[in-house]
Image: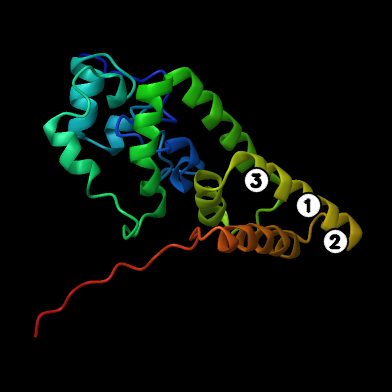
């Protein structure tokens, strides 16, 4: 049986999604997502037209590397991801792809790597078991320099308030308040939206 293709960088979706900043990527257990075309991806996600074209047919990591990007199919798909989308991290797909197209994959992965490290710090030092999605959204949407500064400020406040190392609830509350405050000042939404279903009488 032919071995399924595996991308070199599963933290980046062919479609431009930041898989390395997704809560499912950090889930423990059978429901964990290995990232885009990562190990055992095809056992959990049997089909993806973007992977079929980008990885299987053209041997690329991301659609932005393709000479035909944005093709007619992709262009219409990109237009669907607006600020009204319930999945907040989808807001970055279009800008991610054009960043890669203009500045290259290596530079994007360098920036993404910084965000992944910041997320891992949040999950390691401020995880109360309920904040993973919030941290993932924050590290996707907020500037890297501000994330670094806010993590430092949270550490200082924890030390000043003498919060115990095992008091994850208080530690998480401090960081989330700082992240939320900065986001609100910049008009960035960090809480997941509920999908609205139109009902016809």
N-terminal-most mark, 3 or 2: 3
When the figure is inspected, residue 141 is found, relative to residue 11, above or below; the finding is: below
How far is mark 2 from mark 1, CA to CA?
A: 14 Å
N-terminal-most mark, 3 or 1: 3
How far is mark 3 from mark 1, CA to CA?
A: 10 Å
**Which is more toward the observer, 196 or 184?**
184
How far is mark 3 from mark 2, CA to CA?
A: 21 Å
- Using residue 144 as the reference point, say whether residue 21 is left or right of it: left
Residue located 85% across and 59% down the image: 164
Q: Which mark is residue 153?
A: 1
Q: Which residue is mark 3?
A: 147
Residue located 48% across and 36% down the image: 20
Residue located 35% across and 56% down the image: 83
When the figure is inspected, residue 63 is found, relative to residue 159, above or below; the finding is: above
Q: What secondary structure is found at the residue carrying circle 3?
A: helix
Q: What secondary structure is found at the residue carrying circle 2?
A: loop
**Which is more toward the observer, 116 or 48?**
116
Q: Which mark is residue 163?
A: 2
Residue 138, percent from left and from top = 55, 51
């Amino acid at each position: 049986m032919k071995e399924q293709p595996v991308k070199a960088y599963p933290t980046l979706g062919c479609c431009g999604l930041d898989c390395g900043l997704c809560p499912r990527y950090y889930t423990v257990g059978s429901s964990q997502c290995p990232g885009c075309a990562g190990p055992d991806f095809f056992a959990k996600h049997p089909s993806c037209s973007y992977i079929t074209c980008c990885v299987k047919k053209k041997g690329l990591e991301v659609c932005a590397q393709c000479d035909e990007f944005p093709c007619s199919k992709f262009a219409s798909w990109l237009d669907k991801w607006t600020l009204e989308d319930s999945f907040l991290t989808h807001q970055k797909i279009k800008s991610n792809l054009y960043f890669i197209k203009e500045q290259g994959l290596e530079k994007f992965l360098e920036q993404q790597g910084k965000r992944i490290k910041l997320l891992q710090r949040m999950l390691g030092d401020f995880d109360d078991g309920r904040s993973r999605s919030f941290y993932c959204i924050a590290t996707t949407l907020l500037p890297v320099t501000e994330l670094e500064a806010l993590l430092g400020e949270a550490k200082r406040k924890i030390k000043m308030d003498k919060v115990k190392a095992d008091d994850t609830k208080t530690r998480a509350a401090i960081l989330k308040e700082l992240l939320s405050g900065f986001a609100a000042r910049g008009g960035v939404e960090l809480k997941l939206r509920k999908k609205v279903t139109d009902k016809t009488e």
